[in-house]
Image (cartoon, helix red, strand yellow):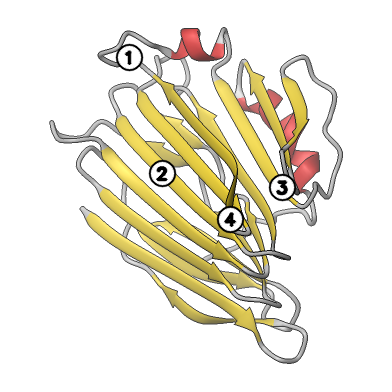
Amino acid sequence: MRAFAQVVAEADGRGGTRLAVLRGESPLLLRRTGGRSGGDATVHLVGGAAGPLRGDDLRLEVTVRAGAVLTVRSVAAQLALPGRPAPASRLVIHASVAGTLRWLPEPLIAAAGCDHHTSSVIEVAEGGELVWRDDLVCGRHAEPSGDVRLDTTIRYGGRTLYRHDLTVGRHADGWDGAAVLGGGRAVGTVVAVPGLPGTLTASPGAALMPLAGPGVLATAVGADIRQVQAALDPLCATEAPTPLPVAA
């Protein structure tokens, strides 16, 4: 399955944010769920089909123009599934940020047998603001992790600020989740430019590190996603995410 989704947020001239473009294809469906009366805009990703499955090729483009404030969440966790014999499923995300972007989706779950690759490139202009969160759960309850690779590059003012590549599961090179994450089955990261709105909760598996430029990195590893969320959620809680009914 191939799908493309795009959102473009821009200032509306009255102190608010309007969505100049909001389009999607199953399973990448986008729905505006908040911010209609001014201020920031909130968009939820809606899974219009199961997956991603092996062979899926998904692309998402996010543009936040100067003066706009956009929050992107998801209605539910993304579940990478095995599917038929095929190349790895792939999700490519490209974001261009001159305003403020808060990327706060639910976790990615790597089900046993999946083979999935998410590649994210975020370009932040001078003066832009970003909170970018990625959470990964290695397998569903009582099952091994599938194969998953997450690579993320964040640039600020044209200069690389953060580059990270995480690979878990059983691959031809012999690396598996235990080698990469120790005993952890869940991992999360938050990158914030220029800084974090909240405070990292003390945890044995959590760390906060300044980046070589405007920005900080927070990361947490835990036995399950609840430990990761307990450490990282306070960093991102500008407002409590309330589940909203979303029309198809």
Q: Residues within 10 Å of mark 2 (few under 14, many from 20)?
A: some
Q: Nearer the viewer, mark 1 or mark 3?
A: 3
Secondary-structure class at tag 4: strand
Disc 4 target residue: 73
Q: CA distance from mark 1 to mark 3?
A: 31 Å
Mark 1 or mark 3, which has the lower sequence index? 1
- Residue type at numbered disc 4: Arg
Of residue 27 and residue 221, the one placed in the foreground of this image is 221
Q: CA distance from mark 2 to mark 1?
A: 19 Å
Disc 1 target residue: 170
Q: Nearer the viewer, mark 2 or mark 4?
A: 2
Secondary-structure class at tag 3: strand
- Residue type at numbered disc 3: Ala
Q: Are marks 2 and 1 in contact (CB under 8 Å)?
A: no
Percent across and percent down for residue 125 are: 63, 64
Location of residue 156 (image quadrant): bottom right
Secondary-structure class at tag 2: strand
Marking on residue 119 = 2
Q: Indicate left or right for 25 with 168 as reference.
A: left
- Residue type at numbered disc 2: Ser
- Residue type at numbered disc 1: Arg
Percent across and percent down for residue 194 are: 77, 52
Disc 3 target residue: 192
